[in-house]
């Protein structure tokens, strides 16, 4: 484009005008779609996300209850049941059951969860190399025994979080018998939640691979998931009369908190993804969007590393700045929004493991940032106040706010909901949240399907097509909007 002459541009413009007039005349839907407000697009995209997500749950060619990470069988081969991806996906099914579903939908979704219990029990009881720490299983349910980054201890924690979520829903609808099937208070190891909590409570002190299956050490994301699983597990164990375990899970969660605190790096001013990392020396910025994912997925609504924690806000801003610097697609036009990747030093392009490249932005990480901002808007609205601190001031100053408002933001002040500035800040948080979905919208396929990554230069979809987690991530951000 930089080399295009002025007259060439004019020609393109003329062509566009003609095309536009023509499209009005015959009303080409694809053209019209581009101009729709975001909210319209979100509504359409939700239908695609639900459909494509369902298609990867118990898909043809896999065992009932298995969740394929993607239907892609080569470059990359994602035709596996990843414990993490499956847990994140099935948690969205529980959220759907909590909402307004028709009786038919309820029946289908409940059956999906039951099948997922059976498949998970098969995984838990099989002779896998690292037991419950095994990151992925073949689609027929047999353990995957090839070389891999194992163990990954976020898997059992996330799976417990999903089943605990479902157990609470069952309990609130008076179906206690079914709850006891998920957590057997007499022989916990024989039930899906009990086995996971047993593993989590006895393994959190050991290092493992992270959610990106690469770095070895102690991970913020993994530990936030472990903590949530233990705390919510403790509550359920207590309710079912298993007090000794309830106490044990709670005390382990409390000891874990001290470890999670170690991720805060006051010198750098952000939360580090991994401490005591023993590999990947090139991954040294200490910035990784898995921290934001950990805050969202490990959220227990008790203030511990909450989204509104000023250390979390400072980390989010540092991540945005880092990704903004390195992805050319962010600068290709004046459209708002920042594409978010896993971490700045990423080299995984998804298609050729032997040819590391400059990493790309990812759909699921960009969606998570949208969810993060909408969560902030909701949390601050509930609090009725926004406290500005030396640590979070720059975060708020980076919001899309009128200049006069920006100038009035000062560390040490608390903006109460009676102050007109409060509502402007809430709207700005939502607006910024939307900007991440505008990025997703801009780069995904015209039919709404999503691959794992967005090429950092061309903006094309790359790596695993129809990545299940992308659709689950879409639904997560969608339910956070209100
Ligand atoms: C390295 C990638 O970074 C990781 O996320 C991926 O799962 C594995 N390779 C396997 O392809
Ligand atoms: C690579 C990602 O890094 C990992 O988190 C994920 O579990 C697998 N792909 C499968 O989607």
Image: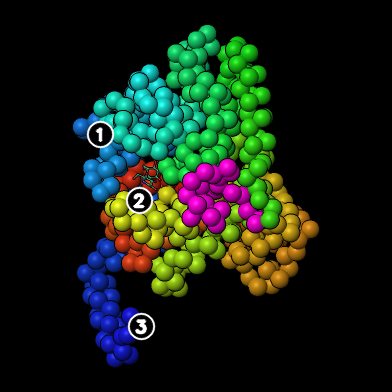
Tell me the CA gap for discs 3 and 2: 29 Å
Question: Is residue 468 left or right of 11 when viewed as pictured?
Answer: right
The residue that label 1 is drawn on is 59
Residue 73, quarter of picture: top left
Specify start and end residues of the magenta stretch as a single range: 268-293
Q: In this view, does 274 lie above or below 268?
A: above
Magenta-drawn stretch, dominant element (helix, strand or loop): loop
Mark 2 surroundings within 10 Å by alpha-carbon count, few (fewer than 14), some (14 through 19), many (20 or more) = many
x and y percent of residue 344 in the render? 48, 58
Task: Report which residue position mark 2 lands on.
Answer: 452
Q: Earlier in the sequence, mark 3 or mark 2?
A: 3
Q: Is mark 2 on a helix, strand or loop?
A: loop
> Is residue 104 highlighted in magenta?
no
> Percent from the top left, x then y, of residue 366?
45, 54
Q: Identify which residue is drawn at 31% across, 30% down.
A: 145
Query: Left or right: where does residue 25 sit relative to residue 185?
Result: left
The residue singled out by tag 3 in the image is 2
Extreme residue toward the top, this view: 186
Task: Look at the image and say whether residue 285 sits in the magenta stretch.
Answer: yes
| Quadrant assignment, res 116 | top left
Furthest-right residue in view? 412
């Amino acid at each position: 484009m930089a080399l295009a002459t002025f007259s060439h541009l004019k020609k393109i413009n003329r062509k566009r005008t003609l095309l536009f007039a023509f499209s009005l005349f015959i009303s080409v839907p694809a053209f019209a779609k581009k101009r729709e407000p975001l909210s319209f697009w979100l509504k359409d995209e939700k239908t695609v996300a639900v459909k494509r997500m369902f298609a990867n749950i118990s898909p043809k060619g896999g065992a009932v209850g298995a969740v394929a990470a993607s239907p892609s069988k080569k470059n990359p081969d994602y035709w596996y049941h990843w414990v993490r991806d499956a847990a994140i996906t099935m948690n969205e099914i529980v959220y759907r059951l909590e909402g307004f579903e028709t009786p038919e939908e309820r029946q289908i979704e409940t059956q999906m969860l039951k099948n997922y219990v059976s498949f998970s029990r098969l995984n838990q009881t099989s002779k896998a190399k690292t037991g419950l720490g095994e990151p992925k299983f073949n689609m027929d349910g047999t353990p995957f025994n090839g070389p891999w980054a194992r163990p990954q201890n976020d898997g059992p924690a996330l799976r417990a979080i999903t089943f605990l979520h479902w157990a609470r829903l069952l309990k609130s609808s008076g179906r206690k018998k079914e709850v006891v099937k998920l957590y057997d208070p007499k022989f916990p190891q024989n039930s899906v939640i009990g086995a996971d909590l047993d593993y989590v409570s006895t393994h959190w002190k050991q290092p493992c691979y992270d959610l990106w299956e690469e770095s070895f050490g102690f991970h913020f994301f993994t530990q936030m998931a472990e903590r949530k699983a233990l705390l919510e597990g403790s509550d359920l164990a207590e309710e079912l009369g298993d007090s000794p375990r309830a106490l044990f899970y709670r005390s382990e969660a409390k000891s874990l908190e001290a470890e999670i605190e170690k991720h805060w790096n006051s010198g750098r001013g952000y939360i580090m993804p991994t401490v005591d990392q023993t590999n990947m020396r090139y991954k040294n910025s200490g910035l990784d969007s898995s921290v934001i994912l950990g805050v969202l997925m490990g959220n227990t609504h008790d203030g511990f590393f909450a989204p509104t924690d000023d250390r979390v806000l400072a980390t989010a801003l540092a991540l945005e700045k880092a990704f903004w610097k390195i992805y050319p697609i962010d600068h290709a036009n004046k459209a708002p929004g920042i594409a978010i990747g896993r971490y700045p030093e990423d080299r995984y392009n998804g298609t050729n493991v032997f040819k590391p490249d400059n990493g790309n932005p990812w759909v699921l990480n960009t969606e998570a940032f949208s969810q993060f901002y909408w969560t902030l808007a909701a949390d601050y609205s509930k609090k009725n106040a926004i406290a500005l601190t030396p640590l979070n001031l720059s975060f708020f100053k980076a919001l899309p706010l009128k200049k006069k408002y920006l100038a009035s933001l000062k560390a040490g002040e608390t903006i109460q909901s009676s102050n007109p500035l409060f509502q402007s800040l809430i709207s700005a948080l939502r607006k910024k949240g939307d900007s991440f979905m505008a990025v997703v919208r801009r780069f995904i396929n015209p039919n709404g399907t999503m691959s794992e990554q967005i090429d950092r230069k061309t903006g094309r979809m790359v790596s695993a097509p129809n990545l299940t987690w992308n659709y689950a991530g879409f639904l997560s951000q969608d339910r956070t909007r209100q």
